[in-house]
Image: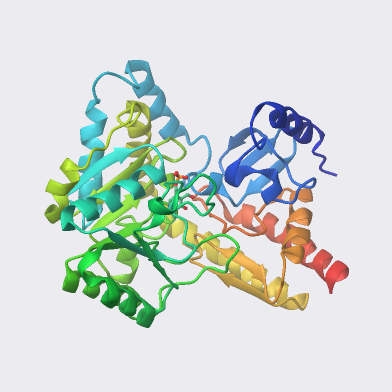
Amino acid sequence: MAKFDKSYHLFDRASKVIPGGIPGHQSPMLLVFGASPCFIERAEGARFWDVDGNEYIDYMCAYGPMVLGYNHPKVEAAARAQGKKTDTGNLPTERYVELAERLVGIVPIADWAIFGKNGSDVTTYACRVARYQTGRNKIIMIDGCYHGIGAWCTPISAGITAGETADMLTFNYNDIEQFKRIVAENKDDVAGVILTPFRHEALHDSEMPAPGFLETVRKTCDDIGGVFIVDDVRAGFRMHMGGSLEKFGVKPDLICFSKALGNGHPISACVGKESLRSAASQVFFTGSFFTSGVPMAAALATLDEMEATGAIEIMYKNGEMLKDGMLDQADTYGQQVNYTGPETIPFMTFAGEDGWDKAKVFCEECYQRGVFFHPFHNWFISSAHTEEDIKKTLDATDAAFKRVKEKMG
Ligand SMILES: Cc1ncc(COP(=O)(O)O)c(C=O)c1O
């Protein structure tokens, strides 16, 4: 029986010295409070161990970064080798140039790349590039979509002024008519559009782009001279090595990457087209750690390993096995579920639920059986997940569906 005594003792200590204890997406309030762990002790491959010694096959992958699995030997060896030489310094290292060259080589739309630390750094930067390029103010985004903690997009309004969001226009995902209307009403002031490759915000079924949606955004940006930005921070390198929109055959102007790029090492990148190079070089973008060598060495090793092993195909294959197995089980136990998103970034909700009660019961049973899912945030597959892991996972999910049926019908 998994217990979480040390986790909650640590959380009490954290709450005394850190506002909110664990603020943000890793808060235990956002899992199954009291029945899920709060702190990690160690992690390896597709597994992690919490501070109470409970072991989990992990389907959150640190909310995306662990694309090859935790503590990947080749990535960590590259990081260590760079660390022995230098990490954060007065000047960038050779890795900085190599990584930009590498991204320009693998991402078809990329003629240049620039680096930050977090996804928020580059999504904010991309909007500024769009504004500087066009001399216009408005950025169009999907209502409710997450692009980070920039004042322009943070979903929680505490501490944000009305002025900071005044130039954002929102529309509903896949609503082509509403999008066209907003553009028509603001045409002379639209600098660009920022979209994730598919809709994947928390507390929602994921949604793939409707036929013609991405093409309409592309054409509209061309017609009005606006910049099409793709926020690939969450999905990047789990759908296509060249940026997720390659999957749909649509070419944006700017792409923001982070999470999977360094397999857990802190790095983000914005890549873009030649036509935006001048604007990109004039928008002020710098940070004490933006050029650190270790995450860049890790990112180079991550990209090499992903290409060498066909990591994305492995993730799709195992993700498909998980999906098929869980859908069969849901059927067996008479549960209506929505299994959405690409197989590499899947999500499952219980259809027609008002709250998240079934999802929490489901996850609680999975935690007890050593499998880590999130009740209301999309999941992630890594290439470290094996067929054997998926089989073990399906044993746990079978019991979890059974428990949901017994407890909640
Ligand atoms: C789509 C998307 N954009 C931007 C961000 C922000 O990235 P970060 O948390 O690294 O600032 C996230 C983080 O989850 C994200 O999912």
The scheme the figure's colours follow is: rainbow
Q: Between 134 and 84, which is closer to the camera in this rendering?
A: 134
Q: Residue at x 30, y 19 (%)?
A: 89
Do we see residue 111 in this rendering? yes
Q: Is residue 355 above or below residue 63?
A: below
Q: Is residue 270 above or below residue 340?
A: above
Q: Position of residue 8 (x, y in %)?
A: 77, 35
Report the quarter where the C terminus lies: bottom right
Report the quarter where the N terminus lies: top right
Do we see residue 215 in this rendering? no
Q: Residue at x 65, y 48 (%)?
A: 57
Q: Between 375 and 403, which is closer to the camera in this rendering?
A: 375
| Quadrant of the rendered image containing residue 359 | bottom right
Q: Is residue 27 above or below residue 230?
A: above
Q: Position of residue 19 (x, y in %)?
A: 64, 33
Q: Residue at x 34, y 26 (%)?
A: 288
Q: Between 174 and 246, which is closer to the camera in this rendering?
A: 174
Q: Please give left or right for residue 92 compared with residue 29 in the image.
A: left
Q: How many marks?
A: 0
Q: Residue at x 67, y 50 (%)?
A: 30
Q: Position of residue 99 (x, y in %)?
A: 26, 38
Q: Please give left or right for residue 199 compared with residue 187 in the image.
A: right
View extreme (front): residue = 162
